[in-house]
Amino acid sequence: MTKSIMIVGVGGQGTLLASRILGNTVISEGYDVKVSEVHGMSQRGGSVVTYVKFGDKVYSPIIGIGEADIILAFEQLEAYRALPYLKKGGTIIANTQKMNPMPVITGAAEYPENIIEKIQQSSSLIPVDALELAEKAGNIKAVNVVLIGVMAKSTDIAYETWVETIKSTVPPKFLDVNLKAFELGYNLK
Amino acid sequence: MKKLLLGNAAVARGAYEAGVRVVSSYPGTPSTEITEEIAKYDEVYCEWAPNEKVGAEVAIGASIAGARAMSCMKHVGLNVMADPVFTMSYIGANGGLVFCVADDPGMHSSQNEQDSRHYAEAAKIMMLEPSDSQECKDFTKAAFELSEKYDTPVFLRLSTRVSHSQSLVEISDRQERELLPYEKNIGKYVMMPGNAIKRHVVVEERERTLEKFANETELNVIEDNGSKIGVITSGIAYMYSHEALGDKVNYLKLGMVYPLPAEKILEFAKGLDAVYVIEELDPVIEKFCKSCGVKVIGKEKFTYLGEYTPAMIKKAVFGEDLPEHAEPKENIPMRPPVMCAGCPHRGTFYVLKKLGLVVSGDIGCYTLGAVAPLATVDTTVCMGASVSAALGMAKARGKEFNKKLVSVIGDSTFMHSGITGLVDIVYNKGANTVIILDNSITGMTGHQDNPTTGYTIRKEPTKQVNLVALCKSIGVSRVVVADPFDLKHFEEVVKEEVAADEPSVIIAQRPCALLKTVKYTGTCKIGSDCRKCKVCMKLGCPAIWQDKDGVHIDANQCNGCGLCINVCPFGCITKED
Ligand SMILES: Cc1ncc(C[n+]2csc(CCOP(=O)(O)OP(=O)(O)O)c2C)c(N)n1
């Protein structure tokens, strides 16, 4: 069985680091894994999507409509945009942060209201104020690791395994903040 | 040992293990990380060239001199380096010579969706195509071997999903290789007609040899699952097909996409009820199969456009629909890429928009000057075209039009192919104004150094091209350096230079806000005395937004660059620590 995890957010939010931590953790568990990343143009504040798939043998690195077991969303609107990708019975873990896209800023479109509630009508969604937790950990940039922490809790991979990969993936300078961020996410009730 | 590697990092690893000595490339998504990863291997000489043609030629020289060499580029970079490549096909290779080209189906970061396989056929150069990171490494090593064995350059074709996906790779050690001897050989290395006529014969013989090799090589594999349906595919499309169709079909997976294996295709198709060709972009394999008399199903079921998905393949072959899923019940606003908060280009475009100028644009982060609300860029064709196309516009529409016209071009793009356009303006008595957007880095592709930054790919200090002196030496007497965040002064400079009856260059100098050396502090805040004139909204800064209550600045996104403070006519925006 292949597990499919989709990470969505806004360019610059650190989704790449999240997918790398996730990828490195699952290989240490002995799985075959593929991580599909986005580089270049769309990183400039656009919607970004990365896919992490693992299992006995993974062929396609991308995740299709109705196939994601978990969607890790760094921003509300991006969670909503990714909704069709969620597998029936899957879970969205969503940062409650809102970031206005340019069409909203210019007044050409409106930011939808009550996104969390709307998603919850059809699907399971865990809201997380990751920005607040990241701030508590000491750096708002650690939103990504907070969310990884929340997700880690729902897997059968041991806490220590995650900590080990964070240690080997994150630059030493930011290690303490990130370990704290992971712990805050992991222990969210 | 197995490691999780990006396709691009695996290509770099393969080249390293194969003993590559010289790598010269120009950045371009999705190929950039190959050369960045090579730079981490101290044994390899590695550089950013000013453009792809130069990069290819450096690799060519190294190969002739006896070293294994490589040059990497995005698909459109292959257009720029096509000239030497076509002739290198005649010369062949001394040390193994690999050109690594990354296509971008779906145009994640590109201005077109061209299929580089056509170049392989046109230039008569063998092309390999991996489908995951392990193959990226293995095929790169194979490419060096085959290049030396068959005396030919070899293309390695990648695509965005292969380049930018990570998968597991078995790592080995580097095999150090002695330089091959360099021997003067005018008949082989000097391509003038008398010699080239003879070399063309060699090329055609090599083509026949490689056609035979294509039928025998293990790069092309048949996977027989006992089905009556066959799929011929390559690269990432193989992975999508396998995910979609599993062991319900037979596969012919082509690892070598030029020349194609006629006999192997015939053997594969024999006795099958239906054969599908599944390939992104153009029907290259499909047309070849048809030319061999094999009946295949291709573009009548599959699109020429964009990336494929397993779901699309399932639908086309088995008629299966998408799995059950939820949909939002309203329109979701798009989130297109935007210039970052603090981007120096924002000041330039604000002024150009205010002055209502026609802007001959180019390729880089500043192409985003075409996006609302700035919507200031009029044209974007290819790297360098901003300068030369503006001369054409001015020659077509005359002097008055030229006084409302500017070109904008980044520092890296100016080095890449803007200089020759400027020479044309001076030489042919144009009076254009060219604005070089000097943000001290190659921004779009993720911060590569270039000849104007003063550093090499390995961050060693080096000579820095002096843009002012360069433009002056070309013959431009009016060269002005201005800060695009000093809006008042910048506006005056632009007005003055477009009015001049001779060529002029404005160097808009302010570093990229994402550079570590740039340290803006605090955040901007809109005071309660705001008169809601919304001039600041015209900047298109992602940190500034409005609702019923007025205009606000998002402290999480603002980096304190202060451009909005300069633009507010009533002094209502201030900086907070
Ligand atoms: C022939 C070709 N090579 C490479 C690219 C990829 N590419 C697009 S813009 C760019 C460089 C942009 O740098 P610069 O001109 O300094 O502008 P900035 O992005 O920093 O504003 C590159 C390498 C391309 N589009 N075409």
Image (spheres, coloured by chain):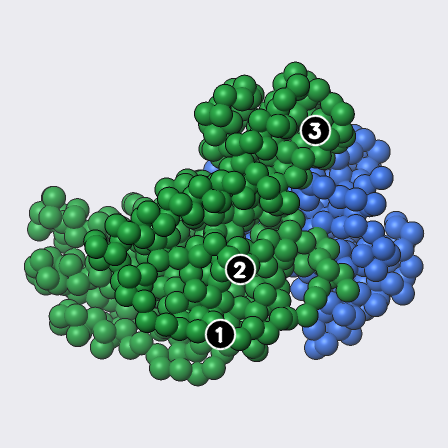
Chain colours: A blue, B green
Q: Which residue is mark 3?
A: B250
| For discs 3 and 1, the disc positioned in front in the rendered view | 1
* Image: B572 above or below A80: below
Q: Residue at x 81, y 31 (%)?
A: A88
Tell me whether marks 3 and 1 sit on the same chain.
yes
Q: Chain of mark 3?
A: B
In this rendered view, identify the residue nearer to me: A6 or A57: A57
* Image: A170 above or below B114: below
Q: Residue at x 54, y 44 (%)?
A: B213
Q: Are marks 2 and 1 in contact (CB under 8 Å)?
A: no
Q: Quadrant of residue A177?
A: bottom right
Q: Any mark on residue B179, and which? A: 1
In the rendered view, does B299 fall on the left or right side of B480? right
In this rendered view, identify the residue nearer to me: A42 or B549: A42
Dot 3 lies on which element?
strand
Q: Position of residue B163 (x, y in %)?
A: 58, 52
Label 3, label 1: how far apart the Cα atoms are: 44 Å
Dot 1 lies on which element?
loop
Label 2, label 1: how far apart the Cα atoms are: 14 Å
Specify the amino acid type for callout 2: Phe
Dot 2 lies on which element?
helix
Specify the amino acid type for callout 3: Asn
* Image: B326 above or below B361: above
Q: Residue at x 49, y 74 (%)?
A: B179
Specify the amino acid type for callout 1: Leu
Q: Chain of mark 1?
A: B
Q: Earlier in the sequence, mark 2 or mark 1?
A: 2
Q: Any mark on residue B144, and which? A: 2
